[in-house]
Image (spheres, helix red, strand yellow):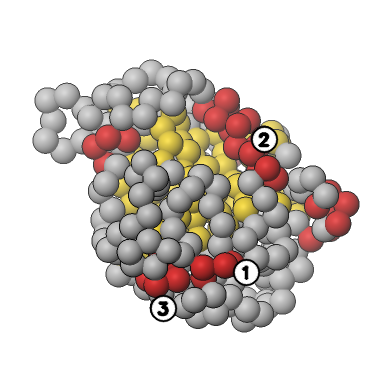
């Protein structure tokens, strides 16, 4: 479902139900999605358009991802130098189809210059890895948990993206390949969305009642402006069963997103994915063309 939020007062909640394919009948009550426009400037904020979907296969979310791409705009600027006035950037972590597992590192600067994205975590670092296989055994080997080889799937083969030692990932944006600069200039984007795999806990009927999260959801997106104000937050829709795929993204009318915080699951990867622990991995990131700040 694509939803356009109407005007909101600060901290006012908006709720939308999302389901794809057979899920529209089977689990419709279990995938409601809470979203919130927040921050000091919320009264003056034009709410974004929200894109979200979840289901058992890639086809369950493909149409929503395509709609999000269209909303961000064409073309996919790939590694083209910026600043550019239109289009989008995408990262699929796949390195042209390689199946190696990269050592965890933070900040993760692989795409800082080429696509204007820098990613950090308060944990050990961030890693690219297939669910299993490859020289290092994928995420199953990275976390020494063989079950990870079967409970996760990819939206774009072969690799996923994950923090190590944390379940928090933060994104900052820069002008890609900016000319005549040693350090890429900071930037903002119109929209940001991400694909997730194995989000088990919905935000309505989760088994736990965590402090500060009474709805029981495990995976969340928080968006911030250049002043550090949180301007939007939402839980990511869930789908039952192992290897499911979820997508969540928003698009504003202008480039106002300076930072995104992604919470994947309710615990850092490592333990078994069970009734107590919801372990979640990330796949493709899609975001609007980074626009330079009007002032440093």
Residue 57 coordinates in the image, percent (x, y): 67, 50
Residue indicated by mark 3: 144
Q: Earlier in the sequence, mark 1 or mark 2?
A: 2
Q: Secondary structure at mark 3?
A: loop
Along the line of sight, the residue nearer the viewer: 296 or 126: 126
Along the line of sight, the residue nearer the viewer: 292 or 124: 124
Q: Secondary structure at mark 2?
A: helix
Q: Mark 2 packing: few (<14 Cα in 10 Å), some, or many (20+)?
A: some
Judge whether 27 appears above or below 212 on screen. above
Q: Nearer the viewer, mark 1 or mark 2?
A: 2
Q: Earlier in the sequence, mark 1 or mark 3?
A: 3
- Quadrant where the C terminus is found in the figure: top left
As drawn, the residue found furthest toward the right would be: 25
Residue indicated by mark 1: 213
For the point 79% across and 45% down, the residue is 21
Residue 106 coordinates in the image, percent (x, y): 27, 59
């Amino acid at each position: 479902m694509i939803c356009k939020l109407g005007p909101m007062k600060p901290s006012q909640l908006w709720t939308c139900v999302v389901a794809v394919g057979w899920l529209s009948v089977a689990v419709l009550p279990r995938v409601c999605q809470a979203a919130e426009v927040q921050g000091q400037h919320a009264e003056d904020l034009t709410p974004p358009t929200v894109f979200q979907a979840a289901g058992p296969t890639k086809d369950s979310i493909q149409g929503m991802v395509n709609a999000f791409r269209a909303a961000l705009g064409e073309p996919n600027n790939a590694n083209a130098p910026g600043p550019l006035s239109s289009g989008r950037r995408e990262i699929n972590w796949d390195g042209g189809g390689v199946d190696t597992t990269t050592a965890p590192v933070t900040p993760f600067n692989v795409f800082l210059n080429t696509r204007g994205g820098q990613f950090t975590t308060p944990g050990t670092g961030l890693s690219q890895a297939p669910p299993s296989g490859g020289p290092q055994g994928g995420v199953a080997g990275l976390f020494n948990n063989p079950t990870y080889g079967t409970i996760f799937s990819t939206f774009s083969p072969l690799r996923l993206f994950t923090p190590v030692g944390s379940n928090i990932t933060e994104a900052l944006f820069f002008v890609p390949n900016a000319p005549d600069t040693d350090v890429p200039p900071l930037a903002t984007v119109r929209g940001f969305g991400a694909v997730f795999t194995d989000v088990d806990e919905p935000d309505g009927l989760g088994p736990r009642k965590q402090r500060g999260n009474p709805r029981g959801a495990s995976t969340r997106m928080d968006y911030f402006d250049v002043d550090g104000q949180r301007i939007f937050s939402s839980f990511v829709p869930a789908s039952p069963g192992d290897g499911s795929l979820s997508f969540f993204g928003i698009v504003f009318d202008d480039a106002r997103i300076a930072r995104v915080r992604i919470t994947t699951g309710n615990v850092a990867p490592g333990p078994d994915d069970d009734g107590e622990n919801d372990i979640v991995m990330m796949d493709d990131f899609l975001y609007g063309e980074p626009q330079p700040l009007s002032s440093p």
